[in-house]
Amino acid sequence: MPAVVPHRFLIAPSGFKESLDSTEVAEAIGRGIRRALPGAITERIPMVDGGEGTAEALARSTGGRLVHHQVSGPVGDPVDSHFALLGGDLEGTAVVEMAAAAGLRLVPADLRDPTATSTRGVGELVLAALDAGATRIIVGCGDSGTSDGGAGFVRALGARILDVDGTEIAEGGAALAGAVRLDLTGLDPRVRQVDIQVACNIHNVLTGERGVARVFGPQKGASPEQVETLDRALTRWAELLSTTCADTLEELHLDVATGPGTGASGGLGAALAAVCGAHLRERFEVLLDGELSGIDLDAAIERADIVITAEGAVDFQTPRGKVPAEVARRAEAKGKPCLALAGSIGEGATDVHDIGIGAILNIITIPMDLAQAVAEAQTLVADAAERATRLLVIGATFDAD
């Protein structure tokens, strides 16, 4: 007998960095599906991964609200930012999305120097959340434009980072090479009195070959020389955190230099754990378990015939904690097929077939530069979703026998 045409589609994409957020990607995929299959039922769950849009999505899913607050941006200029206060059973929980204060989109293209940018604004958001009465804080790590090891963050909380002369060092990761003392006497005591859960990619570590400088420095604008400078500076920072915050790190059973999640958001994870006693957790455990977020991905997968996810680039990094990998893992566990749309397909992309993604479809079909692809992203995504759906319909015309 003929195979069955998929009728219920779950759309669970990531955003496309500096182009479309996950809600926009989901809407575009839905349009493409309905062009090919007008009667299709589409359920959209724009995925949150701790990066841009996380605070807004969780406020919406729990009936909470966004609180707007101006903070110091990653290059020092004031920026309009926000955090979320969740509603319903989660009152008292705040969501601080680090990208809202120190994200890559807040760093002008001509100022992208990860040796100089700062996470100070993230600390200012945490203080604002505490002032608003938060008793638990979820910090979303993703889409960062900084690599200062969280040094700016802890200074916003009242810490001081001093050089050999007892003078405060400059902002930015490179300056950490000259740090000899971390003074926590002025730290706001509230940060050690609240439950801080960090939603991060636990594959990211602070130092070494897989560390912040070498893996993410070039993506944030670092030259080869700056990569080496930054790695040396972050190694020094790890030593300082290890000695100053030894008791806290022992309680967490965490090696601050190479422990899981210490490299999250340019090393912000390391500072959150060491200085604040925060728990570094796999981001999807925090954001998709329903209990904290109101988002129940597993239940939505159960209702679907097929799952479609998406990401700006599918490559060797995708299986290491990216949104499509998590969606595919959960879909495979429930016996549901999963298709991925990609802005680009890079080295190692075929590895995703081992984690449950049955097929990858590139949204770009003709040569075009990045600026054109960004400008036409919604159309490209919708067209790719339409092509994928038409292929599924054709495939269903063959006999299952």
Image (cartoon, rainbow, N blue to C red):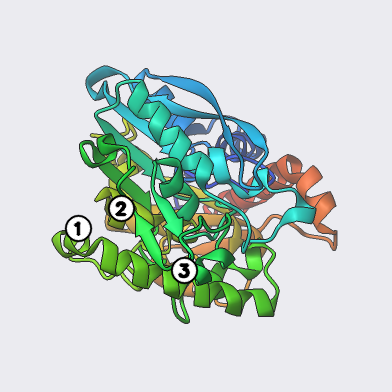
N-terminal of the pair, mark 2 or mark 3, is: 3
Other-residue count near label 1 (Cα within 10 Å), few / some / many at <14 / 14–19 / ≥20: some
Residue furthest left as drawn: 251
Are the two marked residues, 2 and 3, in contact with CB atoms closer than 8 angstroms? no
Q: Quadrant of residue 29?
A: top right
How far apart, in angstroms, are the residues tagged by discs 3 and 1?
25 Å
Who is closer to the viewer here, 127 or 205?
Answer: 127
Determine which residue is flagged by label 3.
164
Residue found at x 58% / y 67%: 174
Give the vertical position of 103 relative to 127 (above or below): below
Q: Quadrant of residue 35?
A: top right
Circle 3 Cα neighbour tier, 10 Å, few/some/many (<14 / 14–19 / ≥20): few
Disc number placed over residue 79 in the picture, else none? none
Name the mark nearer the viewer: 3 or 1.
3
Q: Please report contact status of discs 1 and 2: CB closer than 8 Å, yes or no.
A: yes
Label 2: few (<14), some or many (≥20) within 10 Å? many
User: Residue 214 versus residue 114: which sits nearer the camera?
Assistant: 114
Amino acid type for the residue under numbered disc 2: Val
Amino acid tagged 3: Val
* Residue 80: x %, y % from top left: 61, 28
| Relative horizontal placement of residue 104, taking residue 159 as reference (left or right) | right
Secondary structure of the residue carrying tag 3 is: loop
- Compared to residue 169, the image places residue 29 above or below, namely above
Counting residues from the start of the chain, the first of labels 3 and 1 encountered is 3
Q: Residue at x 51, y 70 (%)?
A: 178
Say whether residue 281 is visible.
Answer: no
Task: Decide if residue 42 is in sight here.
Answer: yes
Instruction: Name the amino acid type tagged 1.
Output: Thr
Q: CA distance from mark 2 to mark 3?
A: 21 Å
Which residue is disc 1 drawn over? 248
**Residue hosting label 2:** 275
